[in-house]
């Protein structure tokens, strides 16, 4: 009977131990599960934060890359636009030069009047008794006498004419004053260029670029 009783107590003890072990195991497993859940939640939060950081960083990098591309495109556009503007101005000046040269070669009363007015204005500005006049070969042959007479009437006692390689227009030098007045086609175009560029910008380029025009 004792053995049976001991055996019974042992069985109960085992069952008690096992029950306690199961309870502890369940409790510790639950605690472990909760810790695991907390760790997982924290890891997920960190991962999400990291992911957001990476995404934000990626977006920022994409934005920077976009800005770089846009800036590069804008720079290329500006460079291309400047080149186009320069080409347009150059073509316009070339066309004007051709037209001026054509008119100079044709000569005529208006052209001669322009030469005379320029020469008389030059000597009148300084009041000199001697002038050197530079003309193209063609103009020298055509207008020497007219210009000499006009300058003599303006009080210039000595007028010297020299052939120049200018394509048209006139250059008046006043040796006594050490100055020169350049009315050649090339000089006229140089002086005209800034005004042409301004007019082109105001009337052609600005409207095309969406400016006020």
Image: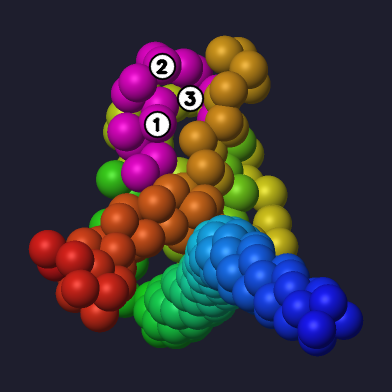
Residue of label 3: 157
Instruction: Say whether residue 64 is visible.
Output: no
Which residue is depicted at the point 34% across and 49% down?
116
Locate residue 71, reporting x and y percent.
53, 65
Nearer the observer, 204 or 20 = 20
The C terminus lies in which quarter of the figure? bottom left
Instruction: Determine if the magenta segment contains residue 176.
Output: no
The first of marks 3 and 1 along the sequence is 1
Q: Secondary structure at mark 1?
A: helix
Q: Quadrant of the N terminus?
A: bottom right
Bounds of the magenta segment: 118-131
- Image spot of residue 33 (x, y percent): 59, 70
Neighbour class for label 1 at 10 Å: few (<14), some, many (≥20)?
A: many
Residue 3 locus on image (x, y percent) = 87, 81
150 to 22, vertically: above or below: above
Predominant SS of the magenta segment? helix
Q: Which mark is residue 126?
A: 2
* Residue for point 83% across, 77% down: 2
- Tag 1 residue: 122
Give the structural element (helix, strand or loop) at label 3.
loop
Residue at the left extreme? 212
Q: Residues within 10 Å of mark 3 (few under 14, many from 20)?
A: few
Q: Residue at x 39, y 52 (%)?
A: 194
- Circle 1/circle 2 CB separation < 8 Å: yes
């Amino acid at each position: 009977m004792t053995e049976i009783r001991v055996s019974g107590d042992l069985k109960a003890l085992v069952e008690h131990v096992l029950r306690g072990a199961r309870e502890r195991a369940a409790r510790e497993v639950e605690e472990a599960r909760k810790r695991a859940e907390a760790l997982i939640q924290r890891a997920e939060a960190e991962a999400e934060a990291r992911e957001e950081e990476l995404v934000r960083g990626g977006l920022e990098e994409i934005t920077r890359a976009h800005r770089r591309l846009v800036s590069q495109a804008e720079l290329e556009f500006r460079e291309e636009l400047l080149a186009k503007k320069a080409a347009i101005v150059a073509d316009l000046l070339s066309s004007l030069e051709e037209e001026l040269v054509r008119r100079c070669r044709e000569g005529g009363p208006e052209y001669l009047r322009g030469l005379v007015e320029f020469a008389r204005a030059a000597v009148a500005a300084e009041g000199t008794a001697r002038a050197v006049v530079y003309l193209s070969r063609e103009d020298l042959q055509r207008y020497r006498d007219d210009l000499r007479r006009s300058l003599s009437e303006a009080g210039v006692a000595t007028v010297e004419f020299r052939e120049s390689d200018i394509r048209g227009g006139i250059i008046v030098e006043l040796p006594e004053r050490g100055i020169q007045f350049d009315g050649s086609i090339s000089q006229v175009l140089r002086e005209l260029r800034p005004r042409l560029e301004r007019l082109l910008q105001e009337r052609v380029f600005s409207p095309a670029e969406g400016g006020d025009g």
